[in-house]
């Protein structure tokens, strides 16, 4: 038997405490038990037998004790039973020459000697140039790989036929796209035999990535999508670029380790890539979606969409505080014995939908939270977020562009983050839409939409379209101060006029067939429309519109003292009330919108963006809505 190199033991009052990996146990016995095992440590590390251990003690009476120890440690997979292993044992010369490899395999493999034989017999082809390619070759040689062959020259002239021939007998192919020696990874993979394992490496000028082992072009495309998104994150952030050639060398070393893990069968867990970034040359593991080649669209059936009872709650890094059942523009019910403002705050249940953390995950997410430390948070909570991917669909696999900033607002950071998150999703749905999908939709009047559920998505898009039609028909009827119900709405109106010096006036619009109302906040001096929002009642719509206009005015005031990145202008029509409307109210509005479409002789069409190229499945609903 032989002791596994990653096993640890220590004396405890009950006997000997053993640990290996995430498992531990206690071998019970008297204090002298530790001395017996510790005296045999060198023999166990080099490989020994029960007879040799008994002979080393010089006392045959120790055999039962040693037999019990050996049987227990073999059962706990701390000792390797050399008589039961699969594969030939390495000879002494090979074991000494590749001691580090053998130590790694004995610590991580159930059958280390079979894995040792596979690694020593493997042939790995390295394609590409630059400092990363040299690091891969050195790492493979140090890891004991049997044969390392060059598949592609280090200069622009690429011998693709040579790559195909040399890779025919290769266990793994490593392809390096270095900024100093560019290589088209997809074209190189196309030259290989189907199913050839490939480890892609992208060593860029500011960030480097090492992919998982890919077995088909679709997986390589998924890695390239992650590379493009990571490039966008690096471009939109404040971190320094990873210095070259250190980043490329580290990426090459990680690729060599990935090859070893693949050959030895120790590559377990989710499919991940390594990002090499920052001035300190740090590494971060990020998930790589396995299936699909990018965004996936799915048509929605409006008549079958309903919304379950859920409340929004979003804040980066914090559980939300939500007051369920309080409609915008309406004062919450105050329990007897409590004054206004002292009502209990009820947190949202843990199972309710929140902004998926994957949407803002570093290197792969759709957005990064803004640097809002200097942003005024009174009277409203404001959150900014930057859309990380630049213009165009993520299937283009081209990074290096900058996306816009969006503004979110709410009664607290949770609600503000939710508003910003939905704005990000609407923007990305617009960028992911392609001409082919547009032709399939049969209508040019497409409206990007997003929401907690598919019903929210449909109502969001249909309300925005109906609101734009209503605004095009008329400027609306003036809404006087006396007609605005609720102290909160009047307070916001007063803030706009007195605190932010915005001479705001309200205009109300109605749409036949809908109980919901549309209210616009207009600058009385310039005629500029500051915000337009829907609401289930006139008071709700006025509150939502004043809330949105106040948020914009507060943001503009903050930029005078603490400059902020410019944000996208307000949407022509907003649906902020949907974020807090009860589910039954959303369903009623959807039924009215569908009935209105039938009266107009139009058919609602909708497409949901189900999957992002790097985030994977999108938890919140976003896509396009149209009336055809």
Image (tube, grey):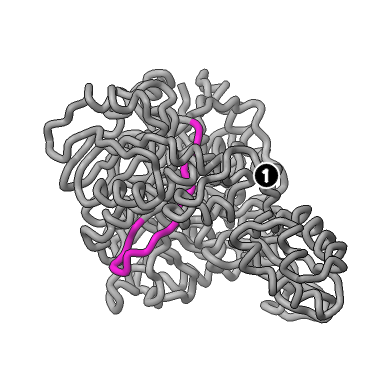
Q: Give the percent coordinates (x, y) of residue 425.
A: 45, 45
Write the residue at 45% across / 67% down: 382
Write the residue at 64% across / 42% down: 586
Locate the N terminus by quadrant: bottom right
Report which quarter residue 540 is drawn in.
Answer: bottom right
Between 626 and 100, the one lying in front of the other is 100
Task: Tell whether 13 sits left or right of 41.
Answer: right
Task: Tell whether 381 sits left or right of 61.
Answer: left
- Magenta region, residue range: 276-291
Q: Is residue 235 above or below residue 445?
A: below
Q: Give the percent coordinates (x, y) of residue 60.
A: 84, 66
Residue 381 in magenta? no
Report which quarter residue 278 is drawn in.
Answer: bottom left
Q: Is residue 255 above or below residue 405?
A: above
Between 378 and 86, the one lying in front of the other is 86
Residue 284 in magenta? yes
> Which residue, given by chain and number where applicable, does mark 1 sit on?
585
Report which quarter residue 43 is drawn in.
Answer: bottom right
């Amino acid at each position: 038997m032989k002791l596994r190199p990653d096993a640890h033991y220590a004396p405890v009052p009950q006997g000997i405490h053993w640990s290996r990996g995430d498992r531990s146990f206690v071998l019970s016995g008297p204090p002298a038990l530790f001395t017996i095992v510790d005296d045999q440590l060198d023999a166990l590390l080099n490989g020994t037998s029960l007879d040799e251990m008994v002979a080393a003690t010089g006392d045959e009476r120790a055999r039962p004790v040693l037999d019990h120890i050996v049987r227990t440690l073999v059962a706990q997979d701390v000792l390797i039973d050399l008589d039961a292993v699969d594969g030939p044992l390495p000879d002494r010369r090979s074991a000494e020459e590749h001691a580090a490899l053998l130590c790694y395999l004995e610590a991580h493999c159930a059958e280390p000697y079979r894995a040792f034989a596979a690694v020593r017999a493997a042939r790995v082809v390295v394609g590409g140039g630059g400092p990363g390619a040299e690091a891969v070759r050195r790492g493979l040689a140090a890891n004991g790989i049997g044969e390392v062959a060059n598949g592609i020259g280090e200069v622009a002239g690429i011998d693709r036929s040579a790559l195909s021939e040399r890779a025919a007998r290769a266990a793994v192919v490593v392809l390096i796209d270095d900024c100093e020696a560019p290589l088209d990874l997809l074209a190189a993979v196309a030259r290989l035999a189907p199913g050839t394992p490939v480890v892609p490496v992208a060593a860029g000028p500011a960030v480097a990535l090492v992919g998982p082992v890919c077995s088909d072009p679709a997986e390589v495309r998924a890695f390239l999508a992650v590379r493009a998104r990571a490039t966008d994150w690096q471009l939109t952030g404040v971190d320094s670029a990873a210095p070259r050639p250190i980043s490329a060398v580290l990426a090459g070393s990680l690729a060599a380790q990935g090859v070893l893990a693949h050959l030895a069968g120790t590559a377990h867990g989710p499919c991940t890539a390594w990002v090499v970034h920052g001035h300190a040359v740090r590494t971060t593991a990020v998930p790589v979606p396995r299936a699909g080649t990018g965004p996936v669209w799915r048509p929605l059936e409006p008549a079958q969409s309903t919304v379950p009872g859920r409340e929004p709650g979003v804040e980066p890094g914090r559980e939300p505080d939500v007051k369920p059942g309080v409609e915008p523009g309406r004062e919450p019910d105050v329990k007897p014995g409590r004054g206004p403002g002292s009502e209990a705050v009820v947190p949202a249940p843990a199972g309710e939908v929140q902004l998926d953390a994957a949407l803002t995950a570093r290197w792969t997410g759709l957005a990064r939270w803004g640097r809002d430390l200097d942003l005024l948070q009174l009277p409203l909570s404001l959150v900014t977020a930057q859309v990380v991917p630049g213009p165009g669909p993520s299937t283009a696999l081209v990074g290096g562009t900058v996306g816009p900033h969006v503004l979110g607002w709410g009664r607290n950071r949770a609600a503000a983050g939710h508003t910003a998150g939905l704005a990000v999703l609407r923007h990305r749905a617009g960028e992911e839409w392609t001409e082919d999908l547009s032709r399939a939709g049969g209508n040019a009047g497409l409206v990007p939409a997003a929401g907690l559920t598919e019903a929210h998505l449909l109502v969001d898009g249909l309300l925005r379209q109906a609101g734009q039609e209503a605004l095009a028909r008329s400027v609306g009827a003036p809404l006087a101060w006396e007609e605005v119900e609720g102290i909160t709405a009047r307070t916001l109106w007063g803030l706009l006029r007195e605190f932010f010096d915005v001479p705001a006036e309200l205009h109300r619009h109605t749409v036949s067939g809908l109980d919901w109302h549309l209210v616009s906040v207009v600058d009385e001096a310039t005629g500029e429309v500051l915000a337009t929002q829907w609401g289930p009642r006139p008071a709700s719509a006025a509150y939502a519109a004043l809330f949105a206009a106040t948020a914009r005015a507060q943001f503009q005031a903050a930029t005078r003292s603490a400059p902020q990145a410019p944000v996208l202008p307000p949407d022509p029509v907003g649906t902020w009330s949907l974020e807090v409307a009860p589910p039954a109210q959303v369903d009623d509005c959807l039924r009215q919108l569908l009935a209105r479409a039938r009266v107009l002789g139009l058919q609602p069409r909708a497409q949901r963006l189900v999957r992002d190229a790097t985030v994977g499945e999108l938890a919140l609903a976003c896509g396009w809505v149209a009336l055809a």
